[in-house]
Every structure is written in C-alpha cells, then in structure tokens.
Amino acid sequence: MTINILLADDSEVIRFLFSKALEREPDMHVVATASDGVQALELTKKHLPDVIVLDIEMPNMDGARANFHYATYARHIHCGARRTY
C-alpha cells in the first residue's frame, strides 16, 4: 500500500529536501507540494492525500489554521506540523 503525502512549506528548499527523503521510501509518494496553507487546501481537495506535513508558519494561511479546515471535511487525513527555528 502506498502512502500519498502532501507537503506544505513556504521554503522551496525544505519542500525539495522532504520530497527527496520521502520518495526514497518505496511505500511513500509525494502527490503534491504547496507553498502556503491556501494552496495546500486546494491541492488536498484535488489529490486527497493520506498524510499532510504542514509548516506552522506560512503566508496566506498558517499550518494550524489549515489543519482546522482539514478536520471539517476530511477526517481521514493525518496531519503533522513542523516548525523551524
């Protein structure tokens, strides 16, 4: 079974590094990446990932607010948030 993942982070470098690391796992597939929470919501509706990895601080809509929206229409999705100091 393949786990479909959506990555949301405003840093292009972080999105690239996470994607490369996850794609090395045979049972994980990054279906989309987003640079902010609004884009992540749109891509979630389109791709219906199993897992979403969110940055807490992003422009337009932060990860915490985006996580709230996921819970209202897609309860099966598992979200993880990350923060860089």
Image: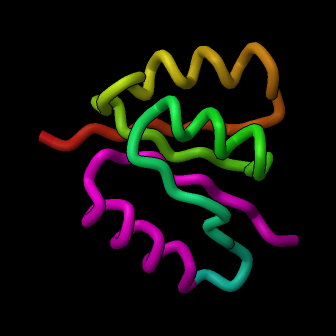
Identify the colour scheme used. rainbow
Give the side of residue 26 with respect to residue 24, left or right.
right
Which residue does the image show at 34% across and 72% down from the upper left? 17
Name the quarter where the C terminus is drawn: top left
Residue 4, placed above or below residue 21: above
Which residue does the image show at 59% across and 15% down from the upper left? 68
**Residue 28 quadrant:** bottom right
Residue 17, placed above or below residue 85: below
Q: Position of residue 70 (x, y in %)?
A: 68, 24
Q: Does 83 appear in magenta?
A: no
The part of the chain drawn in magenta is 1-24
Q: Does 4 appear in magenta?
A: yes
Give the side of residue 28 with respect to residue 83, left or right.
right
Q: Position of residue 75 (x, y in %)?
A: 80, 25
Which residue does the image show at 41% across and 22% down from the upper left? 61
Q: How many discs mark residues in the rendered view?
A: 0
Residue 21, placed above or below residue 50: below
Tell which residue pokes out farthest to the right in this image: 1
Which residue does the image show at 64% across and 58% down from the upper left? 5
Residue 71, placed above or below residue 38: above
Q: Position of residue 15 (x, y in %)?
A: 38, 62
Q: Nearer the viewer, residue 46 or 1?
A: 46
Tell which residue pokes out farthest to the left in this image: 85
Q: Position of residue 76 (x, y in %)?
A: 83, 34
Name the quarter where the N terminus is drawn: bottom right
Give the side of residue 24 with respect to residue 48, left or right.
left
**Residue 25 quadrant:** bottom right
